[in-house]
Image: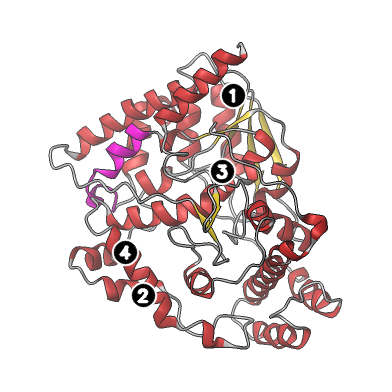
Amino acid sequence: MPNDAKRVAENKLNERGIEFEYGFIPRFVISGKKVEFNTISEAASTCSSLQYDYRALNVFFRTGMFLGDTTPFREIRRISPPPWIIPADEYLTRDQAIRAYIECFRDAVQARAREHTILGLSGGRDSRHIAFELTRTPYKPDYAVTIDLESVNDAEIARHICNALGIEHQVVASTKESPEAHLWRNRKTNLLSLQHLWVVSFSRQRDRRWWWDGIGGDVLSAGLFLDQWKLELFRSNRLEELANKLVAAGRVSLFPDQSKFCRDEAVDEVLKELRLHSKAANPVGSFYFWNRTRIDIASSAFALLGLNGKRTLAPYLDKEVYRLLASLPAEYFIDYQFHTDAINLAFPEYRDIPYSTRKTTRPERRPLLSYFQEVANGTLESTYAGKAWLLLHGLWGLVSRDRKSALGWRRAHALYLKSLDEIRAIPNDAVNITRPTVLEET
């Protein structure tokens, strides 16, 4: 396709989606400056100094999410326009909504279909639905990729899907745990996530073909995070009670000085955000979509998997798909069957292909050993996490019911603090200072 025609096609694609307009593609600004940056590192290189935003970090460590436009640094904000809140559509029955979803999603995939793409395929619903719809276009993906995780049988199920559709299937090993992988992930996700380590190896070596991603499908149509008790608290306007339940109690691990991590302040921040979503048709889904999905999950779809000019195709972020799904009452999703029913109705010939299930895995001894080795050699040390403090937390982890999980989490937390130090040091490191990169709309 000629360059001009390609550019026009890409612009039309942007007009259909909410990725750029609503801040799913990471962009950052500094107070008092009009320049937009692709990464926190680039933004940091133009600051004279950086201060930690302890209020934002408090929320992150207690909920697993940054909210709104916050980042770990007070001087740097993420561009996150106000969420698009849609009240309930009282006219569509559940069956009508499923049929509308099928048609709407089909249009979204067809609008994005093109030659030479890769499909990220798991054993779940979101990527499967994309795969099925692509068979109705002239453009099957060149191949599908499945990351082989220890915990689920995605690779086995994805192979069945690819065999049924005649799509080449590649299985890629999950990233091996290492400090270097953690630090690379932290930097590339702009310190906005503690997830996605499993995809690091693939993202570092993947080719430049466009990537089909199922971001948003789970929260919008499968009821992820939607529980009856959360919905009841929203419906009865008991938002302070809900905020208290969403914010972890106790200490923020690895920080000797807890004065900067008052739990009540984190509850206040979550409460403010919950109020923004109280009028949504599915307030629980809305809260998670505009925070966890837009910030944390987008750091995989549009950062890790969209590095160096590589593009991401996200049909669940199509404006009409979002408009429809966000207008449906939460009660349509509470049994977690809505998306499954839509796929079965649209593609009955594939309804016998099962969904992935969790594997029974034996705990590994290596994380226990590696944690203490990395404490001993100083790999995990940072401004806040000194060797003695890390050792003490490691010993606490050993008495946990799930030692592997406890020590693995502390290890990830310690390496996150190390990455914070590295970014904060950029303004004082003349070697690292580079010209700011203004993000092009793509």
The amino acid marked with disc number 4 is Leu
Residue 23 at x, y percent in the picture: 46, 46
Q: Which of marks 2 and 1 is nearer the N terminus?
A: 1
The residue that mark 1 highlights is 141
Residue that lies at the very extreme toward the top in this rendered image: 2
Mark pair 3, 1: CA separation: 17 Å
The residue that mark 3 highlights is 301
The amino acid marked with disc number 2 is Asp
The amino acid marked with disc number 1 is Pro
Residue that lies at the very extreme toward the front in this rendered image: 32
Looking at the rendered image, the quarter that the C terminus falls into is top right
The residue that mark 4 highlights is 274
- Position of 333 relative to 387 (above/below): above
Asked whether 13 or 143 is in front, the reply is 13
Q: Earlier in the sequence, mark 2 or mark 3?
A: 2
What's the magenta region? 319-334
Mark pair 2, 1: CA separation: 46 Å
The residue located at (61%, 82%) in the rendering is: 400
